[in-house]
Image: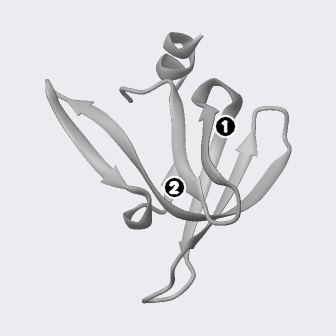
Amino acid sequence: MLDAELAFDQADYGRRRLAYSDISDVQLSRSGWLSAHDEMAIQRRGGDVEHVHVSSGEVRLEHFGTVQRHKLRNLQRIRPSLACLRRAR
C-alpha cells in the first residue's frame, strides 16, 4: 500500500483517515445495486469493531512499479500486511 492511512468519506461524518497500523481487518459490503453508501466494518488491532457507512474512498497499491487505484465500492476485504504496518509507524 502506498498510503499510511485508509482515507474515506463517511456518509454522516465527512472525510476520515485511519492509520493502517491501527487496523487489522476491513470488510466491505454493498448496501444495494444503486445505493448511495456501502457498509464497512473496521476491526482495530485491539479487537474493537466499528461499523460505518462509506460514500467513497480508494486504496492505492504499488504492483511491480505500477500504481493501482481501487475504489472501496469494488472491494470486499482489506487486510494490511505486516510490512505495511511496520512502514506506517
Q: Is residue 53 above or below residue 35?
A: above
Q: Amino acid at mark 2?
A: Arg
Q: Which mark is residue 45?
A: none
Q: Which quadrant of the figure has residue 89?
A: top right
Q: Is residue 24 above or below residue 82?
A: below
Residue lying at the far bottom of the rendered structure: 33
The picture places residue 3, in percent across and down from the top left corner, at 42, 27
Left or right relative to 8: residue 42: right
The picture places residue 25, in percent across and down from the top left corner, at 63, 45
Q: Amino acid at mark 1?
A: Ser
Q: Which quadrant of the figure has residue 52?
A: bottom right
The picture places residue 27, in percent across and down from the top left corner, at 60, 58
Q: Which mark is residue 77?
A: 2
Q: Residue at x 63, y 24 (%)?
A: 21
Rounded to the nearest angstrom, the CA distance separating label 2 from label 1 is 11 Å
Asked whether residue 80 is in view, the answer is no
Say which residue label 1 marks: 24
Callout 2: SS: strand
Left or right relative to 52: residue 73: left
Q: Residue at x 48, y 63 (%)?
A: 76
N-terminal label among 2 and 1: 1
Asked whether residue 71 is in view, the answer is yes
Q: Residue at x 55, y 55 (%)?
A: 9
